[in-house]
Image (spheres, rainbow, N blue to C red):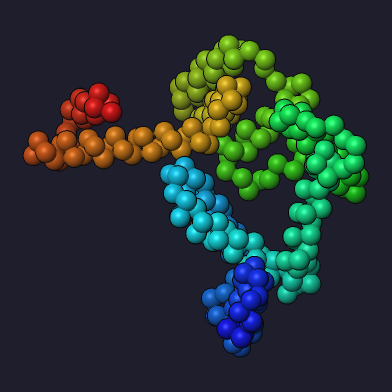
Amino acid sequence: MPESLPPDVAPFDRLVAIMDALRTPETGCPWDLEQTFDTIAPYTLEEAYEVADAIRRGDMQDLCEELGDLLLQVVFHAQIASELGAFSVSDVVAAINDKMVRRHPHVFGAGTEPRNAADQTRAWEQIKAVERAEKAAQGAPPSALDGVALALPALVRAEKLQKRAARTGFDWTNPADIFAKLDEETLEVRDAMAEGAQDHIEEEIGDLLFVTANLARRLNVDPEIALSKANVKFEKRFRAMEVKAAEAGQAFAALDLPGQEALWQAVKRDA
């Protein structure tokens, strides 16, 4: 049991032992014992987002806690894999150690020239391309898009797909061309709306969002971060409108749209 571990045991080893105890049949935690890769995966994504949120807020204490929660997810998945005889947490750590050394020959190799950040990014992608090709040799034909996870949030995945495609030369070089494409996609949304087919509207809205993500990438803006900040700004302004309405003795939802818009403009001026 974790309580019987020597007091000088490494914190990571203690975490692994705790997870092992939680998953021990008969004496472990019933909830933890019921979990699978599939049931834990949503928590893993949630914890990653909470890490990102703590970073955005600059809350170091919260970041420390959230990184611990995310680390727990790694250990949890590794424990389940170990029980299945697939791999252990030591295999996970060894694999990332090997990968980091392999992808940084300028640091860990002999006689390599120092690089700036841009050089390293290019070298990193070349090394990853070789790794993908080696994996693909055992299965389907290789693609520049290999390795972009399906489970990523759609906006994040759109940007990653575009980055991968851009490495082959399939990319706009001028933001003005992307604005032209945005105009085109906006017109296609209008046409789909006139047609009235919901599936077609959904498709064209998707195309519009995809091009918007491409514009963000071309302007060196992370679309996920940009949208997250827009969400925070909208929430702040909406709550401020509700407060202003209440201060005037009104319910915000009872106002007509012009009245709500007037409050919106007032809140923007106050920002």
17 up-or-down from 188: above or below? below
58 up-or-down from 67: above or below? above
Quadrant for the N terminus in the image: bottom right
> Which residue is outermost to the bottom?
26
Residue 212 x, y percent position in the rendering: 54, 25
Quarter occupied by residue 204: top right
Depth check, front residue: 22 or 68: 68
Q: Is residue 212 left or right of residue 174?
A: left
Question: Which residue is at a point 47% across and 34% down the rendered structure image?
Answer: 227
Depth check, front residue: 7 or 42: 7
Is residue 16 at all visible to an observer of this figure? no
Question: Which residue is at a point 76% across and 66% down the rendered structure image?
Answer: 90
Residue 162 x, y percent position in the rendering: 67, 29
Residue 87 x, y percent position in the rendering: 78, 66
Is residue 26 at all visible to an observer of this figure? yes
Residue 76 x, y percent position in the rendering: 63, 67
Question: Which residue is at a point 56% across and 32% down the rendered structure image?
Answer: 222
Image label count: 0
Quadrant for the C terminus in the image: top left
Question: Which residue is at a point 54% across and 18% down the rendered structure image?
Answer: 182
Quarter occupied by residue 144: top right
Q: Is residue 82 left or right of residue 257?
A: right
